[in-house]
Amino acid sequence: MANSSAVAAEGLVVRPSLASDGPFLQRLYQSARPDLQWIDDSVEVVEQVVAQQFQVQEQGLGENFPNAMHYVVEKLGTAIGALSTDFGPNEIRVLYLAFIPAARGQGYGRAVLQGVQKAAQQIRCPVATVVWASNPHALAHYLALGFAVQEYNVAAQRLVWYPQG
């Protein structure tokens, strides 16, 4: 019997993000930030704040990781998620990984992260990420994939996975 990651990976494609993916990526960002829906104001104001926060994230990634690579994750030709990575001098950084609500809990994130780990194993390079304290679900997934907490503060944890052998 195939493992759940292999089943999830069937029909899964990680391709470079295109300018035409912008509307999808903004909707994805909004779905990944339920905290922004708590704003007590009109729908228009909430949408404006979401758009501004999305731009802040995009600008921050561009400034802090100018060589980052951005991908769209597709399942059978339909966009279901996004991945941003940066190949730094000493590690591969997973900067952003998110999926649409309907694709969550299906093993797609695990399959994508295992692909990153496989690439890192080939070049003998650790994989690092930061998980916000408000996202214990993501923390559990990274820990299950062999990541370990390297740094911790109240807001977030830095996790690192080291290749074997």
Image: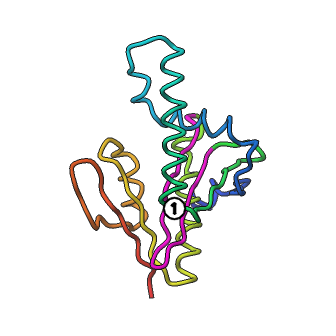
* First to last magenta residue range: 81-101
The residue identified by callout 1 is 65
Location of the C terminus (image quadrant)? bottom left
The answer to whether 99 is drawn above or below residue 88 in the figure is above
Q: Secondary structure at mark 1?
A: loop
Instruction: Judge from the rendering whether residue 68 lies leftward or rightward of residue 35; answer left or right.
Output: right
Q: Is residue 30 above or below residue 13?
A: above
Q: Which residue corresponds to the image point at 38% horizontal and 66% vertical from the top-left?
A: 147
21 versus 160 height, above or below: above
Identify which amino acid the numbered label 1 is placed on: Phe
84 inside magenta stretch: yes
The residue drawn where x is 22% and y is 54% is: 153
- Image spot of residue 39 (x, y percent): 39, 20
Q: Residue at x 26, y 64 (%)?
A: 151
Question: What residue appears at the point 38 percent right and 57 percent down from the top-left corner?
Answer: 130
Q: Position of residue 29 (x, y in %)?
A: 54, 37
